[in-house]
Amino acid sequence: MKIRYRLTAMAALLLAGATGAASAQEIILFDQPNFQGQSLTINRATSDLSAMRFNDRTSSFRIVSGQWEFCVDSNYSGGCFTYTSSEAHLGRYDNLYTGVRPVAPTQTNPGRPGRGNSLTLYSGPNFSGRAVVVTDSQSDLSRLGFNDATQSIRYSGRGSWRVCDDSNFRAACMQVNGDLPTIPGGLAGRISSVEPDYNGNPGGPRPGGPGGNYGPQPRNGVWLFDGADFTGQRVDVQQDTTTLERVGFNDRADSLAVARGETWQVCEHADYRGRCEYFEGDSVEDLTRYYLRNTISSLRRVDGAYGHPGNGYPGPGGGNGYPGPDSDRGMNVRGGVRGVDAAFFARPEVNGMGIDRCLGEGGRFCDEEVARRVCRSAGYSRAAHFSVDRYSRSRTWFIGANQECRAGRCEPMVDLLCTN
């Protein structure tokens, strides 16, 4: 059997010489550690080692010349690793490789044949250390032995990519469309999944939110940009995030875009505290007008029906919010008279102040939204009637932003009738 494999290797060398291809680079594969056992010498690209009866058999290899790329699947797909020196032990990569090919010294990121888009992930800064080439979606980098290992990234192609904090493209994700000698923010050594940026909007600008803004639109979640007008580094958020400190984006957002049909609460402090605003399918090219530029620390999805258990946001009365992720308890709204199937609040109050007609500053999410939330907190399903006192100037409380209205038109809600 050993003589047969030697003859197979010799035939491969003769074929490579006939083509006059990459004879300058050579590698010897061994089916045991420490360069022991049966061997196979290769000096050309081999997309499937099954043809040489060496598929999933490599346990060590000796690089005679050049640098080489090993791939988990045939046709250089799955995960690919680039090596520049011999390996006596492959560890978790033992008996894993199906394809192998030489990499030209100037071709740091060859990508998949026929497709230019790829990322090369490196375990060290400045494109050093162990490397893996990714040409398609990888929902869990632990399958390639590269979970939480990436410290720098080489980019190839035209389309952008997303690298994410958790597996299955969850938690915070960062857009990559160029080389990164170091991973910015808190994602260095934390990347668990990678995919092409399917979430982008290839159609270009679209009508934005109030005021006729134009900007990008994610298909889901929120895009945060560290530059105005949707420029600079982008971080994608698709689930509740108590602090952006974890991904190195705390107090950095200058503009944002929210997916159509989704509503998100965006707050200046961690754990959804401090000043908060609510954005529904909006593109905001400059957060200055919401007093949130370079101040956002947490955000979460609340959707259009505020007040649903598990999708709320901080409310008055202190504590962890109304109704928040961990509680569906109501606000302590005073000033009402209860009947059998209804309650009437001549002037509903919280914290000794009238409830403002809006959830927060900026004149957004007002009237019906506030009335509905107050009624739900009192245990009723809807607001049958309400009015707004637009003439008296009194202290009011924003039940969404969890703060007092101190400037502008502070108008309390009155004559609120809640029913089922």
Image (cartoon, grey):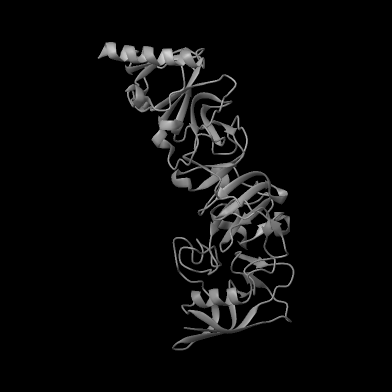
Image point (62%, 45%), residue name: 234
Q: In the picture provided, is 408 more to the left or to the right than 317?
A: right
Image point (72%, 54%), residue name: 286
In the image, is residue 405 above or below residue 375? Answer: above
Spot occupied by residue 22 in the image (x, y as percentages of width and height): 51, 16
Spot occupied by residue 266 in the image (x, y as percentages of width and height): 60, 57
Regarding residue 291, the answer to whether it shows in the image is no
State the residue lying farthest toward the left.
Answer: 1
Image point (61%, 32%), residue name: 179
Give the mark count.
0
The part of the image, by quadrant, that contains residue 283 is: bottom right
298 vs 48, nearest the viewer: 48
Regarding residue 310, the answer to whether it shows in the image is yes
The part of the image, by quadrant, that contains residue 155 is: top right
59 vs 271, nearest the viewer: 59
275 vs 5, nearest the viewer: 5
Q: Quadrant of the N terminus?
A: top left
Q: In the picture provided, is 318 more to the left or to the right than 92?
A: right
In the image, is residue 233 above or below residue 339? Answer: above
Spot occupied by residue 14 in the image (x, y as percentages of width and height): 42, 12
State the residue lying farthest toward the bottom.
Answer: 339
In the image, is residue 160 above or below residue 258? Answer: above
Spot occupied by residue 270 in the image (x, y as percentages of width and height): 56, 52
